[in-house]
Structure formats: structure tokens, C-alpha cells
Image (tube, helix red, strand yellow):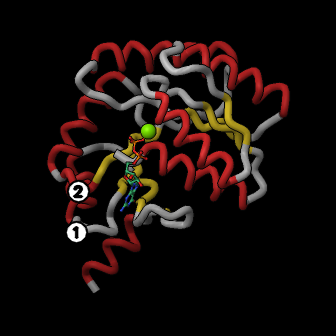
């Protein structure tokens, strides 16, 4: 895991590059998830669009898209739930969110980042396979690479999945996010 934390870090990175960022609290499953994203939004200094716990994530995203249009924001980052015990519902939820975005913001460039916890090893890879069956995942954020996890998981993820690792999380702080460069990584390994 590490989705919400990664969103906070990515928002900070984009804001520091002058982008106007809006966050959407699309994980409505738990109130704590909304609060956590709100803390990040305040820390980074970006707007958060949220609704009450239990509301329809697609409705939150709809509101967020309207806010993006009204404020002429550059980037909208949507948090999602990640619970796999309700996989089918989660996938339906995600599809609905994608439909809203397609309809309301046609033609905008869109990234679907899958956040994987490096400490879960092979489990991360099977999770990625499940997700990429239903959604067009454009990149992976591999978190918790600061812990005991070995960089080997990056190689496994990169070789077993056809999805580029774009960012890596190396801690819980706002700056603990790095761009991942496969070539640099390989050179460091073999030099
Ligand atoms: N050490 C470490 N902890 C992380 C990293 N990314 C997230 N975490 C921690 O992992 C926990 C779960 O993260 P969270 O963002 O809430 O995951 P989510 O449930 O997928 O949204 C939190 O305690 C985070 O501080 C990372 O790159 N390194
Ligand atoms: Mg979360």
C-alpha cells in the first residue's frame, strides 16, 4: 500500500513545479482515509474535494472534475480504495470513475498509477496482474523501498509486468519520492 501517502508526495512534487493541483478523496470507505488525504492536502497547500464517508466515489470525482474546470487546475489526483476483499465492487467503482472522467474531461491526458508495496514481494506482482486485467494501468509507484525490501523487487516487477515503474517511495516524509529510471538503476547494479 502507500496510495494516499504517494498522492501527497506527488502533489508536492507537481506543486513545486508550479502546477495547480487538486486532490479528490475517492476512498470513501473509511472516514480516516478522507482525513488522511486532507492532512496531506493541507501540508502541501492544495485544494481537496471530499464528501462524507460512504458516499459514491464517482460522485466525489464528478465534483472534483467540476472544481478542476472552475479553477482551471492543471492536475487532478484521485485517491481510491484498494481493498481486495471486495475486488469486484472495487473494479466496478473504478470503471464508473473512469467513465465520469472520460465523459467530463474528454481528451485530457490521464495516468493510472498502481501503488505497490515493495515489502509484499510476489504478492505485489499478483496484485498488479489483477488490476491490469480491468484497468489500463500506465505506471507503477513502488513504495517502501527504504525498508528491508531489496531492490530485487523492482527487477521482478519490471520483468514480470508490462508496466513501467515510474516512481519509488523511500520513506514516509513529503520528499521521500524519487523518479525511477530503469537505465540508471541497471547501470548502478552492474557497475
Ligand atoms: N517506510 C515507508 N512507509 C511508507 C511509504 N509509503 C507509505 N508509507 C506508510 O505506509 C502506511 C500506509 O500508507 P497509506 O498511504 O495510508 O496507504 P494506502 O492505504 O494505500 O492509502 C502509512 O503509515 C505510510 O506512512 C514509503 O515509501 N516508505
Ligand atoms: Mg489510502
| The label number, if any, that marks residue 119 in the structure image | 2
Label 1, label 2: how many angstroms apart (C-alpha)? 7 Å
Q: Is residue 98 visible?
A: no
Q: Callout 1: helix, strand or loop?
A: loop
Residue pictured at 55% horizontal, 55% vertical? 9
Q: In the image, residue 119 lies at what x, y percent?
A: 23, 56
Residue 142 location, quadrant: bottom left
| The label number, if any, that marks residue 148 in the structure image | 1
Residue 52 location, quadrant: top right
Q: In the image, residue 163 lies at what x, y percent?
A: 35, 44
Q: Quadrant of the C terminus?
A: bottom left
Please report whichever mark, 1 or 2, sits nearer to the chain's N-terminal start.
Answer: 2
Residue pictured at 57% horizontal, 30% vertical? 25
Binning the other alpha carbons within 10 Å of mark 1 as few (below 14), some (14 to 19) or many (20 upward) gives: few
Q: Nearer the viewer, residue 31 or 104?
A: 31
Q: In the image, residue 120 lies at what x, y percent?
A: 20, 51
Residue pictured at 47% horizontal, 35% vertical? 32
Q: Nearer the viewer, residue 163 or 169?
A: 169
Amino acid at each position: 500500500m502507500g496510495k494516499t501517502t504517494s498522492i501527497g508526495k506527488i502533489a508536492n512534487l507537481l506543486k513545486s513545479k508550479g502546477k495547480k493541483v487538486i486532490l479528490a478523496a475517492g476512498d470513501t470507505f473509511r472516514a480516516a482515509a478522507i482525513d488522511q488525504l486532507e492532512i496531506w492536502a493541507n501540508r502541501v497547500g492544495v485544494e481537496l474535494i471530499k464528501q462524507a464517508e460512504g458516499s459514491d466515489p464517482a460522485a466525489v470525482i464528478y465534483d472534483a472534475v467540476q472544481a478542476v474546470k472552475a479553477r482551471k487546475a492543471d492536475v487532478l489526483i484521485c485517491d481510491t480504495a484498494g481493498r481486495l476483499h471486495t475486488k469486484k465492487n472495487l473494479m466496478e467503482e473504478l470503471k464508473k470513475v473512469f467513465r465520469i472522467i472520460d465523459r467530463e474531461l474528454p481528451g485530457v491526458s490521464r495516468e493510472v498509477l498502481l501503488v505497490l508495496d515493495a515489502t509484499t514481494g510476489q504478492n505485489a506482482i499478483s496484485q498488479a496482474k489483477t488490476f491490469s486485467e480491468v484497468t489500463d494501468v500506465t505506471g507503477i509507484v513502488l513504495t517502501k523501498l527504504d525498508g528491508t525490501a531489496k531492490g530485487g523487487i523492482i527487477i521482478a516487477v519490471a520483468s514480470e509486468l508490462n508496466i513501467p515503474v515510474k516512481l519509488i517511495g523511500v520513506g514516509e516524509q513529503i520528499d521521500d519520492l524519487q523518479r525511477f529510471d530503469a537505465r540508471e538503476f541497471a547501470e548502478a547494479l552492474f557497475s
